[in-house]
Image (cartoon, rainbow, N blue to C red):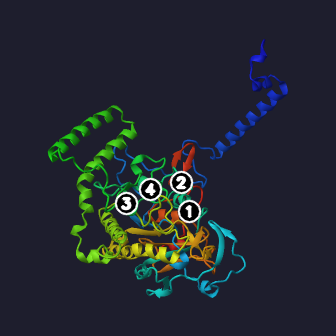
Amino acid sequence: MSNPENLSPHGRGLLDRRNFMKSTGGTLGGLGLAHLLSNDGLAETEDPTNFSGKAPIRPDIEPDHPDVSRVAHHGPAAKQVLVIFCPGAVSHVDTFDYKPDLTKYHGKKPPGIPAVTFEGPTGNIAKPFWDFKPRGESGKMVSDLLPHLGKHVDEFCFFHSLHTPTSTHPQGENFFNTGFTQEGFPSFGAWVTYALGSESEELPAFVAINDPRGMARSGKNNFGNGFLPATFQGTDFNAKNPPSNLARPARYSRKDDHLTTEILKQLNGNHLKRYPGDSNLAARISSYELAGQMQMSVPEVMDLSNEPSSIHKEYGTDAGTDLKREYAKNCILARRLLEKGVRVVQLFNGSDPSGGNGITNWDSHSNIKDTHAMQAEIMDQPTGALINDLKRRGLLEDTLVVWCTEFGRMPFLQGNGTGRDHNPDAFTCFLAGAGVKKGFSYGESDSFGAKAAVNPTSVYDFNATILHLMGLDHERLSYYHNGLERRLTNVHGHVVKEVLA
């Protein structure tokens, strides 16, 4: 070359014989390795396997009907799922995880207690703020804080050794509901509806019923679609606030509205024929058609006035605080949605747009006796009634109930002497209904409830088990995004087979 100065430094390096031979040798070695891997079936590209060695199962989604019901990976125990999520971190040692040593060492500071936790210096061991009593035929110890849920413990399958990698609320909510602490990943409900579609033509496949006080700290990320198609995002409304923009303007008659819808359907259909590969357009058309159906179905499903007075009394819509009555209505709405075939219903008990500290949710860093009691008064009776109502109507045979919170609370008090700090190392959640053992407890925390001790169970394991009960293999349910096979359980998780009925 007459003018090598015009070459880049890398290009000039290749003119050197030794560098050229070294680069060529590395390249040929890589090609040889790729050939050997291909011969051994370890370098497939058209049907790549994930880290587990299993080929991904991607649902066959019809672009113009993305919500049509799809077949599960294996025979499902549950066809629907109700997730009752309690933002703020419910104290397991004051509710479902009985630890006599807390009473034995009350007011003391045994060796091993950390000097500082999430919000500062630690105090002494504190006994439960409510007495525990044996409940049901199983004799499960549950505190007096939750007497209504305590009546139904023979239906519950408790996980007592859950742990999570984060002790902050936004990341904790994200991790529990999406499998990642960062935002932008699909929620559990989005994954399920992506895989299984909908059983209802009149209502969304996935509904998020937000607390009367507002959304939880992570907002729509808790029920978002992430990088999955937008049609799989949860539709959020509650008994007080119906879906937006469904009501027909008063100046339009029902006939005008119907004619407009039919013309739009025809125009959109013609456009889709011209661009058959446009999945976003197809999903948008499907969304519009569902919205049209919801104009008729949503007012009906939200009309709680036709529920008998006995139901209102059982759920508690006629007694207690305004928040309790509104949450009770949300619980009735959840049951009605499940009756109508909604695949995933996510019911929130607590909000946290700006902190809350026990007032808007379960986050009790101070005055836990008052703040937890306030939240329990809202949650306990309606939730207990909802689970009992589902059982009475036979809905638990096909519905899985998940009661959960993002992490637990410490067995000792904070420095202020009145609240318990965040505890990511041990907390309790429970399942009920289709496919799980009744009156059963899995795993144990240590004698203080500070750390998972027997059969430690990650949130990945918990979510893998729920997906399994819905007929889905968590290792194969994936979505190819930015060069990676993404999963709800990332590259972790095992089904807890010991809890399966």
The quadrant in which the N terminus is found is top right
For the residues bearing labels 3 and 2, Cβ distance under 8 angstroms: no
Label whose residue precedes the other's in the sequence (3 or 2) = 3
Mark 4 to mark 3 CA distance (whole Å) = 13 Å
Q: Amino acid at mark 1?
A: Tyr
Instruction: For label 1, count other residues whose C-alpha is less than 10 Å away and answer few (under 14), some (14-19) or many (20+).
Output: many
Label whose residue precedes the other's in the sequence (1 or 3) = 3
Q: Say whether residue 201 is left or right of residue 7.
A: left
Q: Is residue 464 above or below residue 231?
A: below
Name, please, the residue furthest toward the front.
416
Q: Which secondary structure lies at badge 4? A: helix
For the residues bearing labels 1 and 2, Cβ distance under 8 angstroms: no
Q: Which residue is mark 2?
A: 487
Looking at the rendered structure, which numbered label has been put on residue 343? 3
Q: Is residue 132 above or below residue 28?
A: below
Looking at the rendered structure, which numbered label has been put on residue 69? none
Name, please, the residue furthest toward the right.
18
Q: Position of residue 287 (x, y in %)?
A: 33, 46
Q: Amino acid at mark 4?
A: Phe
**Residue 404 appears anywhere in the view:** yes
For the residues bearing labels 4 and 2, Cβ distance under 8 angstroms: no
For the residues bearing labels 1 and 3, Cβ distance under 8 angstroms: no
Mark 4 to mark 1 CA distance (whole Å) = 17 Å
Q: Which residue is mark 4?
A: 223
Mark 4 to mark 2 CA distance (whole Å) = 16 Å
Q: Which residue is mark 1?
A: 460
- Between 138 and 353, which is closer to the camera in this rendering? 353
Mark 1 to mark 2 CA distance (whole Å) = 10 Å
Based on the displayed image, in which of its 4 quarters is residue 298 positioned?
A: bottom left
Q: Position of residue 482 (x, y in %)?
A: 55, 42
Q: Which secondary structure lies at badge 3? A: loop
